[in-house]
Amino acid sequence: MPSVVGLLEQRELVARRRVDELREEADRIQAELVVAERAWKEWAWKEWAIARSRVGEVLGPADKVEHGHDQADRTAPTADGQAEEASSTLEAAKAKSQVPVWREGLAWSALSVDYQRILTALADRARLGQGPLTCQEMAALFGMDVVPARVEALRSKAKRLVARGWLAEPAPGRFTLGQSVSGPADGS
């Protein structure tokens, strides 16, 4: 019959082996975590750099770049040597993918068809003396399925037009033409 001390020594030996195995596994996992953390930090840094450059492009100085043209592209010398601003309608027409900030004399044709469609619907409502329009009503008016995805897409476009001065939002979710914006026929 084995002695109690011998049995305890055997159990201690098995326990020490198990502790050594667990330490090796912990060291391996720790090394994997260090590698994963390093990779995550590199990925996060790259994403941050991309986001920062995009914000810089959007918020860049207006005199440096506007709608993808340099200041030199926007001015033309006149006969007496002074610089003259190029046609704002021509500038805006080249940047169909962006919504330019509204200013007097800027034609609706500066906007993409989707944005023009929203402005036309709201101009018709104003002409008929009707109030603001919701995005759900716009979706129905345009013959779209009134589902959240379509309504949110219209809301995004309407909010962008509000931010650029083309539309006003007198009440949350209700849109109308901006105060100085009028119909497409007069070029503003």
Image (cartoon, rainbow, N blue to C red):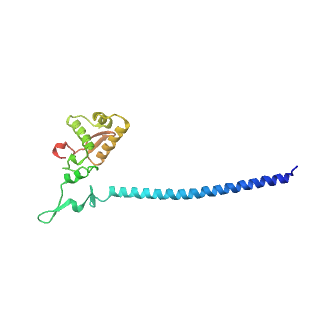
- For residue 29, side relative to residue 39 (left or right): right
Q: Residue furthest front?
A: 1
Viewer-closest of 24 and 105:
24
Q: From the viewer's perspective, is residue 13 above or below residue 149?
A: below
**What residue sits 67% from the left and 57% below the top?**
23
Q: From the viewer's perspective, is residue 178 above or below residue 48?
A: above
Residue 156 % position (x, y): 34, 43
Quadrant of residue 173 in the image?
A: top left
**What residue sits 30% from the left and 33% below the top?**
140
Residue 51 % position (x, y): 40, 55
Viewer-closest of 54 and 186:
54
Q: From the viewer's perspective, is residue 95 above or below residue 172?
A: below
The total number of labels drawn is: 0
Q: Residue furthest left?
A: 79
Residue 178 % position (x, y): 25, 44
Quadrant of residue 114 in the image?
A: top left
Q: Residue furthest bottom?
A: 81
- For residue 73, side relative to residue 23 (left or right): left
Viewer-closest of 66 and 174:
66
**What residue sits 74% from the left and 56% below the top?**
16
Residue 20 % position (x, y): 70, 57
